[in-house]
Image: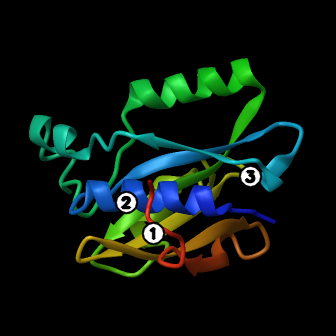
Amino acid sequence: MLLLSPENKRAIRWHAEREYPQECCGFLTAPLSSGLLGPLVVLPVTNAQDRLHRENPSLFQRTARDAFFMEPRELLDTEKKNRESGRFTAVIYHSHIDADAYFSEEDERAALMNGHPAYPGVLHLVVSVRAGRANHFRVFGWSQENRRFEEILGGSLTETPEPS
């Protein structure tokens, strides 16, 4: 079970709204000793999709409005910090712009490698951001039985107060 604190929700909401109208992306990390029960830490990551699209539009056809690609250096730094601090990546999050919080075909394609999760055991949280406001989220986990990502949790981001 994933336990998102009000602080986690505020941090994700703030990041998603700040990046609008581009998709945001990042991680939630947890101590190795506690698993998904936390305490979770939200680590925003730069969405490099626009830069990659400018550099190679034939390979990166989408812009950051409808895709995300985590900045590789930040991704490596996060993994290094996790190892050094006894934490692990529990959740990868990103937002959908002016759309619902669902796990799209593109999301699933990017999350798989040879038909298996690229990050085994890691959950995926998708935030809906409409007109600049992060409304709700859904969390998806890999179903070994059904061989696809399925919704395991959902909730509101609007019930949490604004960051101070």
- Judging from the image, what secondary structure is the residue with disc 3 in? loop
Cα gap from disc 2 to disc 3, whole angstroms: 24 Å
16 sits to left or right of 22: right
Closer to the camera in the image, 63 or 161: 161
Q: Amino acid at mark 2?
A: Ala
Q: Amino acid at mark 1?
A: Val
Image point (78%, 27%), residue name: 86
Sequence-wise first label, 2 or 3: 2
Mark in front: 2 vs 3: 2
Sequence-wise first label, 3 or 1: 3
- Judging from the image, what secondary structure is the residue with disc 2 in? helix
For label 1, the residue is 127
The label number, if any, that marks residue 16 in the structure image: 2
Cα gap from disc 3 to disc 1, whole angstroms: 20 Å
The image's colour scheme reads rainbow
The part of the image, by quadrant, that contains residue 7 is bottom right
